């Protein structure tokens, strides 16, 4: 397809911004700050109740408002809707907005250091938060810790806003933005330019430098060359600044970015394997038998455990060791794919490992959703029963663990099938010969089957 044909095709794509009032709404300079302010007020209420609560909801009672809002509502709803809305949450996010507000008051506007322009810090933060959740912070049942986590990231957004230009926190550090970015490659919407030709012919790149109407892109994206959703925080500044009305938000097939994009990175490839294995293990920890195996393993392998045994910090010591083990398994998972690529596939192993790892994004999302299924249903049922109460009705629901377990297994199977299919399409694009295609498919297939077997084994252990 030549450049003009691609251009015509882009021009013909349906544009959600044409729908009724959307364009006016997103172009209005008061709309985004108003949405941000509402969510900022909610954030403050969550922080207040979080800090006011006693620490562990299981033993001390306490106010579950912060944990319910974050872990039963916001996080699972975000996970289950990302396929529809991509990173649209970033439009409303109060933490990103606080960074912005800081910049409008004071900022040194330094350039973010070149050597840290990658996602490794965000990857490590994300995996650490979930690896440490069970063993250390217990965010999901500890309201003050949940509040402190939010304060930590809000503070970081403020500090980074005061030091660096643009939205460096959102682009390089925020772990939620990172995960939303990777999964938004699967999403059924994309924000792109309507016509690349119009961009090339436009000699003032308003979307980059900004205008009176809208800022230059705060994460350094350029709509003309954007080929995947990952970094666009959907702030709609380019919708406002582009005087050529050349930005569209269009529906598309899920996973389009994974299959089409040629920009691949080691940090994202590693994250995908990390998410699969960490969340499978987190689901395992909900099962008594699995938990016992892990606890015994941690005790028997912790170095100098016999010394720690006689000290008051024995639990902290073992938990730290458990976190090291949990984060190490992410290395093992990525290592499995690397080995599989090396054994079955020729060529540049490192680059192939990176390229083929993107096929595992559907499986990573399915495991992520499976882990959030219980809380998602709990949150939805809470909303329904609250609405019932508002109308004087009593709508009580009980969650059946067996049903949740079946949903989790179905999600895992769907993720596996989608990953093999995506793997086939990526391998086809990358391979010059049938042999190369077969080799790549072997590498993907072996790793995907190992993940599937681990997942099914864990999910079929009874929950006690
Ligand atoms: S990247 Fe993170 S902080 Fe920034 S807007 Fe998105 S969720 Fe909020
Ligand atoms: S301002 Fe509009 S037309 Fe110009 S380069 Fe940016 S998106 Fe393209
Ligand atoms: S300015 Fe446009 S391309 Fe840049 S982050 Fe905002 S919506 Fe995305």
Image: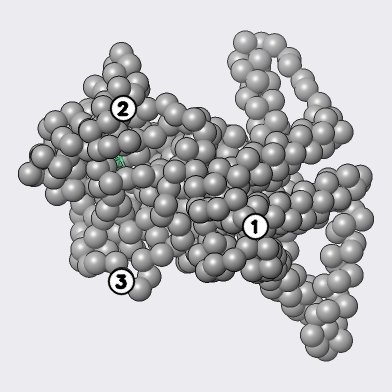
> Residue at the location (8% across, 44% down)?
204
Question: Which quadrant of the view contains residue 214?
Answer: top left
Q: Please tell me whether mark 3 or mark 1 is closer to you in this view.
A: 1
Q: Where is residue 348 in the image (x, y as percent from the top left)?
A: 52, 69
Instruction: Assess disc 2: are there few (<14), some (14-19) or many (≥20) residues with their C-alpha within 10 Å of its C-alpha.
Output: few
Q: Please tell me whether mark 3 or mark 2 is closer to you in this view.
A: 2
- Report how far apart the C-alphas of labels 1 and 2 lie in the structure: 34 Å
> Residue at the location (58% across, 39% down)?
79
Position of 101 with respect to 73 (left or right) is: left
Q: Which of 330 and 129 is in front in this view?
A: 330
Ligand 3 appears in which quadrant?
A: top left
Q: Is residue 234 visible in the rendered structure shown here?
A: yes
Visual colour scheme: one colour
Of the two numbered discs 3 and 2 on the same chain, state the one appearing first in sequence: 2
Q: Are marks 3 and 1 in contact (CB under 8 Å)?
A: no
Instruction: Assess disc 3: are there few (<14), some (14-19) or many (≥20) residues with their C-alpha within 10 Å of its C-alpha.
Output: few
Image mark for residue 113: 3
Q: Where is residue 456 in the image (x, y as percent from the top left)?
A: 83, 46
Position of 360 with respect to 158 (left or right) is: right
Q: Are marks 3 and 2 in contact (CB under 8 Å)?
A: no
Q: Is the residue 183 above or below the residue 295 in the image?
A: above
Residue receiving disc 2: 9
What element does badge 3 sit on? loop
Q: Is the residue 93 above or below the residue 18 in the image?
A: below
């Amino acid at each position: 397809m030549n450049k003009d044909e691609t251009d015509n095709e882009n021009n013909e794509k349906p544009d959600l911004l044409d729908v009724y009032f959307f364009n006016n709404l997103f172009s209005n300079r008061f709309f985004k700050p108003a949405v941000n302010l509402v969510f900022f007020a909610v954030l403050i209420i969550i922080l207040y109740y979080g800090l006011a609560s006693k620490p562990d909801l299981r033993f001390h009672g306490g106010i579950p408002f912060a944990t319910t809002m974050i872990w039963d509502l916001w996080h699972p709803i975000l996970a289950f809707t990302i396929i529809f809305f991509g990173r649209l949450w970033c439009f409303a996010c109060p933490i990103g907005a606080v960074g912005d507000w800081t910049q409008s008051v004071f900022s040194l506007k330094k350039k973010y250091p070149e050597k840290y322009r990658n996602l490794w810090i965000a990857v490590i933060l994300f995996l650490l938060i979930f690896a440490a959740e069970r063993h250390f912070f217990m965010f999901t049942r500890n309201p003050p810790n949940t509040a402190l986590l939010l304060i930590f990231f809000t503070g970081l957004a403020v500090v980074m806003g005061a030091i660096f230009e643009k939205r460096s926190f959102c682009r390089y550090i925020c772990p939620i933005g990172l995960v939303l970015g990777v999964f938004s490659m699967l999403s059924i919407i994309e924000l792109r330019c309507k016509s690349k030709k119009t961009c090339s012919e436009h000699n003032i790149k308003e979307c980059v430098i900004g205008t009176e109407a809208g800022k230059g892109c705060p994460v350094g994206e350029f709509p003309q060359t954007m080929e995947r959703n990952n970094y666009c925080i959907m702030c709609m500044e380019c919708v406002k600044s582009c005087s050529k009305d050349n930005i569209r938000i269009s529906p598309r097939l899920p996973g389009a970015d994974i299959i089409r994009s040629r920009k691949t990175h080691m940090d994202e490839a590693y994250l995908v394997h990390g998410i699969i294995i960490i969340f499978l293990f987190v689901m395992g920890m909900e099962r008594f038998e699995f938990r016992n195996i892990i606890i015994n393993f941690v005790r028997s392998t912790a170095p100098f455990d016999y010394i720690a045994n006689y000290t008051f910090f024995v639990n902290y010591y073992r938990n730290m060791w458990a976190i090291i083990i949990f984060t190490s398994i992410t290395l093992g998972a990525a290592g499995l794919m690397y080995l599989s690529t090396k054994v079955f596939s020729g060529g540049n192993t490192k680059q192939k490992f990176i390229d083929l790892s993107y096929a595992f994004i559907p499986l990573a999302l399915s495991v992520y959703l499976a882990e959030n299924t219980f809380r998602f249903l709990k949150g939805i049922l809470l909303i329904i029963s609250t609405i019932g109460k508002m109308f004087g009705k009593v709508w009580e629901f009980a969650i059946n663990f067996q049903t949740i377990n079946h949903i989790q297994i179905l999600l895992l199977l769907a993720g596996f099938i989608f990953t093999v299919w995506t793997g086939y399409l990526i391998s086809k694009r990358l391979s010059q010969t049938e042999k190369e295609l077969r080799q790549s498919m072997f590498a993907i297939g072996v790793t995907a089957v190992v993940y599937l077997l681990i997942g099914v084994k864990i999910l079929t252990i009874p929950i006690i």
